[in-house]
Image (cartoon, rainbow, N blue to C red):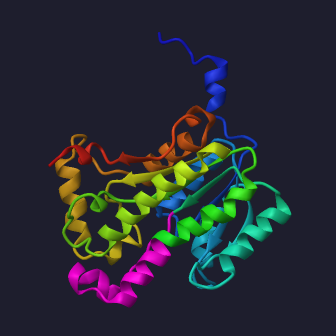
Amino acid sequence: MPAPLAPALAGMFDLTGKRGLVLGIANEHSIAAGCARAFAACGATLAATYLNEKSKPYVTAVTDTLPCEILLPGDVREPGMLEAVFAEITRSWGRLDFLLHAIAFAPRDDLHGRVVDCSAAGFASAMDISCHSFLRAAKLAEPLMQSGGTLLAVTFYGSERVVAHYNLMGPVKAALESSVRYAAAELGAKGIRVHAISPGPIMTRAASGIERFDELLARTSATAPENQPVTIEDVGGLAAFLVSDAAKMITGTVIPVDGGQHLLA
């Protein structure tokens, strides 16, 4: 019979009293939703955003089941909208313990074409929404993390190797991962930890925009060492650990949660 966790160690996984912002919930099947549920299950109180009024009902289907005290529009393309979210967090809470950024986008024509053919405007848009918005959020979160905190981004192994049909998002996610490392180095002295979580293929609304994604999902499930697909609950479990006190000396990492797919050539 294994010995129970020591009370001090068990307490490290308790997020009671922590407050976090989740950016990127699209619907109940999104990675951000899986993470939000995990945070809440561990005791955290949340704030969240929705893209626009059309998407709001899909987001509230998730947030209405959680201790979500703040819900605001959060289209990072709109000037001042992200800043308004942090202004409300400042007014309502006065602090922030963690942030999850799960936002990614590339214009359809640029995403479906060759990387060398992508337009300057499409490349800039994908980088701004998928990468620079994380840095903007990090800067806005910094003054609210006076006692330290955790910033999480979501990436994919197409950043490191060529994945068929991932196309433009490969260079964009590579930039995001590099941004995570630099942010971790710059913010570490303030006790702010920064990570990128790298899930295996998961069928989300964002993934549906990638051509033949179902084939990638099936191939990965068949070839990964664990021979099963990753779920949003798997990602949520890792996210909850990373924002807990148990991970207080870990920062600047890109952590795969992919059933071992990253091991394969």
Q: Position of residue 116 (x, y in %)?
A: 21, 82
From the viewer's perspective, is 188 left or right of 140?
left
Q: How many marks?
A: 0
Is residue 124 found left or right of 140 in the rendered image? left
- The spot of residue 213 in percent (x, y) is 26, 69
User: In the figure, 203 relative to 263: above or below?
Assistant: below
What residue sits 30% from the left and 81% below the top?
Answer: 111
Q: Is residue 196 magenta?
A: no
Residue 263: percent from left, percent from top:
22, 43
Q: Does the magenta-highlighted stretch encompass residue 112?
A: yes
| Residue extending farthest left | 265
Main secondary structure of the magenta stretch: helix
Q: Quadrant of residue 77?
A: bottom right
Residue 70 is situated, as x and y percent measured from the top left of the image, at: 75, 65
Residue 95, image quadrant: bottom right
Task: Look at 27% across and 43% down and name the residue there.
Answer: 260
- At 18% from the left and 50% from the top, the residue drawn is 222
Answer whether residue 37 is visible to the viewer in this image: yes
The image shows residue 246, relative to residue 124, as above or below, that is: above
Can residue 24 be seen here?
no
Q: Which residue lies most toward the right here?
A: 91
Is 105 rendered above or below residue 240? below
Q: Is residue 97 left or right of residue 37?
A: right
Q: Residue at x 24, y 48 (%)?
A: 261
- Give the residues drawn in magenta, as a range: 102-130
